Image (cartoon, helix red, strand yellow):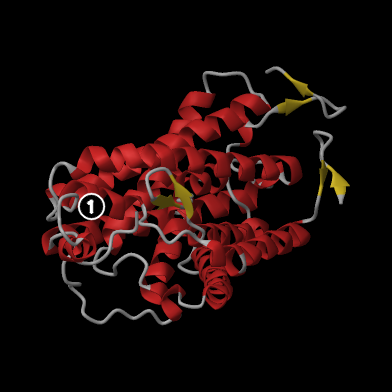
């Protein structure tokens, strides 16, 4: 921990990332178990606009959403069926993929210093 | 607001895939330029240096986790964080866009949360618009105002709120004009997302306040941060 020029005490980058990941894991693994099961805002809009007077609102919702164009829905990672496991795997996969994407963006493909944008 | 497959016509899906893919490709290029500038000019510049790359992953992981938690709002409706504006303000428009694209990709492929065919719709509506639009709106507002913590966080809240409302408007356009839903969906979507936007503003402001307290050097928009004297007290600038 050190003092920034502005006078704030600040933590190192490693602890900052680890603490942030721990918070993300707690949210994804614990808090997600208490997620509300009511329709989300998009589903609510569909129900209210197209299914309000339908005798079976659930069936109407399914009908409005239509058949999936892609019949195969992968759902490799449990489809949130097991929230704690989905949170654990999802947070790790997203962290790795985002970090990897930016790392490769930075280090692959050569320098863009010679592009016209940089010259300008 | 994750749009599932089947809620937009094939032509809309194809068009948004092409447009979204183009924005992602452009974001990759601009992100590399930002990262190179950050390495050569050092910390404190308005870009992300190498050492801050894990923060990008952290932001994506946090947004993914936060999106898993839906909370009830009025009228038997639930809502969750979107996080696009937060990513844009924290990391810049291009890296923010990539962060959101990664989150929605994993959600679509791994969790069937948002369609794969509708991936372009979700990326454009909930990723590109909030991240890029949020970043530039934040900068446009703060350039006119004094540099203080209240102004910074107040603008974060306003930007986050508007990003959700406008994202719902854009998504409504896709599913109404490029999908099977009636025009009546449009005002309902926006009305419901006004409430979602309030939730978004609260969460994003809390997150940015925490980063301001601990590692403000990790934020882009360094020229918008509150100004402090050598004693750590905020001064008006």
Report whether B195 appears left or right of B13. right
Q: Tell me the residue at 65%/32% (across/down).
A: B225
Q: Quadrant of the C terminus of chain B?
A: top right
Pick the residue in front: A37 or A40.
Answer: A37
Say if B210 sits above or below A94 in the image.
above
Reading the image, the residue beneath label 1 is A46
Q: Tell me the residue at 60%/30% (across/down).
A: B152
Q: Is residue B100 visible?
A: yes
Question: Farthest front residue?
Answer: A55
Q: Tell me the residue at 43%/61% (across/down).
A: A37
Pick the residue in front: B189 or B75.
Answer: B75
Say if B46 sits above or below A63 in the image.
above
Occupied quadrant, residue A68: bottom left
Occupied quadrant, residue B114: bottom left
Pick the residue in front: A33 or A58.
Answer: A58
Q: Quadrant of the N terminus of chain B?
A: bottom left
Q: Position of residue B85 (x, y in %)?
A: 47, 43
Say if A113 sits above or below B129 in the image.
below
Mark 1 is surrounded, within 10 Å at the Cα level, by few (under 14), some (14 to 19) or many (20 or more) other residues, namely many
Q: Position of residue A27 (x, y in %)?
A: 61, 62
Report whether B155 appears left or right of B167. right
Q: Is residue A113 visible?
A: no
| Residue at mark 1: chain | A
Q: Position of residue B191 (x, y in %)?
A: 32, 37
Circle 1 sits in a helix, a strand or a loop, which is it?
helix
């Amino acid at each position: 921990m050190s003092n920034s020029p502005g006078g704030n005490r600040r933590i190192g980058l490693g602890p900052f990332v680890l603490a942030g990941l721990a918070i993300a894991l707690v949210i994804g693994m614990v808090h997600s178990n208490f997620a509300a099961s009511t329709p989300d805002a998009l589903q609510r809009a569909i129900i209210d606009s197209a299914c309000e007077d339908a005798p079976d609102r659930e069936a109407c919702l399914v009908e409005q959403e239509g058949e999936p164009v892609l019949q195969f829905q992968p759902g490799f990672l449990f489809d949130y069926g097991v929230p704690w496991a989905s949170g654990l795997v999802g947070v790790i996969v997203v962290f790795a993929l985002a970090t990897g994407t930016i790392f490769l963006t930075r280090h692959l493909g050569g320098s863009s210093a010679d592009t016209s944008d940089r010259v300008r | 607001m994750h749009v599932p497959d089947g809620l937009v016509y094939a032509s809309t899906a194809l068009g948004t895939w092409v447009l979204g893919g183009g924005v992602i490709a452009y974001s990759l290029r601009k992100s590399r330029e930002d990262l190179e500038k950050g390495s050569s000019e050092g910390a404190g510049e308005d870009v992300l240096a190498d050492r801050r790359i894990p923060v990008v992953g952290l932001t994506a992981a946090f947004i993914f986790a936060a999106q898993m938690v839906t909370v009830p709002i009025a009228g038997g409706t639930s809502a969750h964080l979107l996080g696009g504006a937060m990513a844009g303000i924290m990391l810049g428009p291009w890296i923010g866009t990539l962060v959101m694209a990664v989150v929605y990709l994993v959600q679509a492929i791994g969790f069937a949360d948002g369609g794969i065919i509708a991936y372009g719709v979700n990326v454009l509506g909930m990723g590109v618009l909030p991240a890029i639009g949020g970043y530039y709106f934040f900068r446009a507002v703060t350039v006119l105002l004094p540099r203080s913590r209240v102004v910074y966080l107040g603008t974060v809240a306003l930007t986050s709120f508007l990003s959700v409302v406008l994202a719902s408007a854009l998504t409504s356009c896709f599913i109404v004009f490029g999908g099977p839903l009636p025009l009546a969906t449009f005002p309902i979507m926006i009305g419901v997302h006004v409430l979602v936007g309030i939730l978004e503003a609260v969460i994003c402001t809390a997150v940015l306040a925490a980063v301001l307290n601990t590692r403000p050097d990790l934020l882009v928009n360094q020229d918008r941060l509150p100004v402090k004297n050598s004693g750590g007290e905020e001064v008006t600038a």
